[in-house]
């Protein structure tokens, strides 16, 4: 296995770097989102053992219910706890080994979501 795709809900607005929410609310949502990403990664792995890649490319596709301009840098920053949850499963040894590709933003009125595709980078 050299590629893994996980699907998680959109992050809460409090996880955005531009959010001015209370620290307790942000901490609660950070913990919940990290756990959701960890569970989604485990489900995507199934019975397969986590590969423990050292480096991997990470492509984020975000699908929102409504179309409007969105800042992809803030999107990636709001997913930090999700990347930590992915690393918690052992798919990648440390989330600092993730190389983030430009995010893709789309519209899906019926199923807003985040899809994260992680592809191993071979050792050089």
Image (spheres, rainbow, N blue to C red):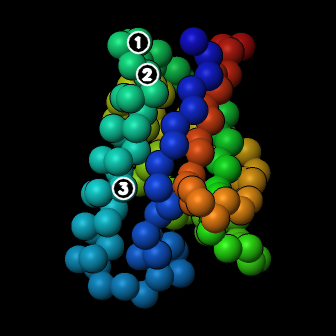
Q: Is mark 2 on a helix, strand or loop?
A: helix
Residue 54 image position (x, y, % from top left): 53, 23
The residue that label 2 is drawn on is: 45
Image point 47% across, 48% down: which residue?
8
Q: Alpha-carbon neighbours of circle 3 within 10 Å: few (<14), some, or many (≥20)? A: many
For residue 94, side relative to residue 77 (left or right): left
Image point 27% across, 77% down: which residue?
25
Say if mark 2 contacts mark 1, CB within 8 Å.
yes
Q: Is mark 3 on a helix, strand or loop?
A: helix
Looking at marks 3 and 2 on the same chain, the residue that comes earlier in the sequence is marked by: 3
Whole-angstrom CA distance, mark 3 to mark 1, is 23 Å
Which numbered dot is residue 33?
3
Q: Outermost residue toward the front?
A: 110
Instruction: Find residue 12 and report its image quarter.
Output: bottom left
Relative to 92, residue 98 above or below: below
Which quarter of the rendering shows the C terminus?
A: top right
Looking at marks 3 and 1 on the same chain, the residue that comes earlier in the sequence is marked by: 3
The residue that label 1 is drawn on is: 48
Which quarter of the rendering shows the N terminus?
A: top right
Q: Is mark 1 on a helix, strand or loop?
A: loop
Residue 45 image position (x, y, % from top left): 43, 22
């Amino acid at each position: 296995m050299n590629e893994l795709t996980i699907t998680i809900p959109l992050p809460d607005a409090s996880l955005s770097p531009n959010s001015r929410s209370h620290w307790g609310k942000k901490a609660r949502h950070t913990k919940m989102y990290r756990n959701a990403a960890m569970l989604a990664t485990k489900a995507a792995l199934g019975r397969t053992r986590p590969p423990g890649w050292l480096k991997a490319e990470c492509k984020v596709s975000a699908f929102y219910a409504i179309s409007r301009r969105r800042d992809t840098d803030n999107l990636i920053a709001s997913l930090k706890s999700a990347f930590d949850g992915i690393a918690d499963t052992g798919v990648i040894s440390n989330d600092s080994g993730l190389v983030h590709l430009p995010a893709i933003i789309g519209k899906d009125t019926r199923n807003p979501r985040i899809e994260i595709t992680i592809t191993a980078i071979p050792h050089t």
